[in-house]
Amino acid sequence: MTGKIFIVDDEAHITRSLVRELSEWGNDHDISFITLNNPLEVMNSISQEGDVFLVISDLRMPEMTGSDLLLKIHKEYPDIITILLTGYSEVEEIMKAIKAGIFSYILKPWDEKYLIAEVNKAYDLYKTKRDRRKYIEMLDEELKWGGELQKTLLMREFPKPDKVEFFVEYQPLPKLYCGGDYYDIIQLSRGRFLVLMGDVAGHGLKAAFITTILKTIIYSGYIRDHRDDERFSPAGFLYWLNSRVNEELSRFPDMLITFVVLLVDIPEKKMIFSNAGQQHFFLIRDDKYYPVYREGICLNITDKPKYLNVTFKLKSHDKIFLFTDGLIEITENRTSLTNEQTGSILLDSTRNGYALKEIIDEFKKVSAQQVFLDDVTLMLIRLM
């Protein structure tokens, strides 16, 4: 690693003395020294030089105190290590320097061995911080990659029939880029559509990886063979999916998955659905909202679950909103918005013609959150 040390003191003989005593250590570590006698020049010099890992500054200087200088450096360059050099024992200025995040302070006249030891410790700390930053950047890139892969797997060109429209908005946790929400819309036969939504427990790459497994299981093991099945049963599908999940995820018994399956039949103007622990959805009809319930046990809990089909008639202009629970969780202890709050937001947003992103923003406003605490998926099925 190459790097630079700034030494700041209004007395030139002090800066020369410090460089002389640190020169051998600097040569051994490929470190160069820059001396400044005016603290007002430091910030501009740092921005021009780059690779500055340490600033050693005197406390008492006529243009600016060392504590004020180091406070400024800490605010603009938090990774730079700082050491205060002082022949005074002024508590107020020392406390200001501590608030500035100084690594150490050295009293004049200094001991050469102690000086070198403190600089060497600052160097080791900087390397540790640099390596940690690089590791975090690497993890961030990996998570971004995972997020892009998940988008590729989940985001697909949905069917665009004449009498129904499908819309989806997916927002993973901002710093994780990917998550455990699963959604899909599959055309089974003319006018019949399978709508899937699930939520894998947890966040990040592990949960995203499970969603990939889910998609592989569903497409290769069921949809391929049942796309034209006129007797397709959402409950039957959940029984099959639970069995496959239990088999594939036997090494991960803690990975619970909620899932809901809707069969939307446009020619028959009906919908059949079955639920495996997923958040209930909402129907908007005739300017009113209706929570639609059906309980069912989560996937990957038991090999003998109980799933039931529920059928109800559809009407023109019906709107069905499905969402994962991250949309309505408003506190870290998982307190949720009430049905009245949720239904009112959906109904008002429908009246105003909001897009799904705008609806999600409305939920943020009501819950007084800048960001959600979990992945969020919102889906709209709108009948013509």
Image (cartoon, rainbow, N blue to C red):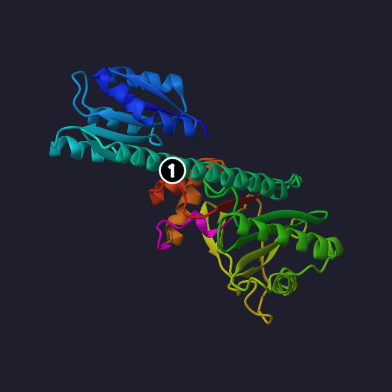
Q: Residue at 61% across / 72% down in the picture?
A: 298
Q: Is residue 136 above or below residue 233?
A: above
Q: Is residue 302 above or below residue 170?
A: below
Among the 4 quarters of the image, the one containing residue 230: bottom right
Give coordinates of residue 201: x percent, y percent: 57, 64
- The residue wearing badge 1 is 124
Q: Residues within 10 Å of mark 1 (few under 14, many from 20)?
A: few
The magenta stretch is 323-335
Is 141 inside the magenta-drawn segment? no
Is 331 inside the magenta-drawn segment? yes
Q: Is residue 347 above or below residue 21?
A: below
**Residue 384 appears in view:** no
Q: Residue at 65% across / 45% down in the picture?
A: 145
Q: Main secondary structure of the magenta part?
A: loop
* Most foreground residue, 159 or 222: 222
Q: In the image, 159: left or right of 368?
A: right
**Residue 374 appears in view:** yes
Give coordinates of residue 133: x percent, y percent: 50, 42
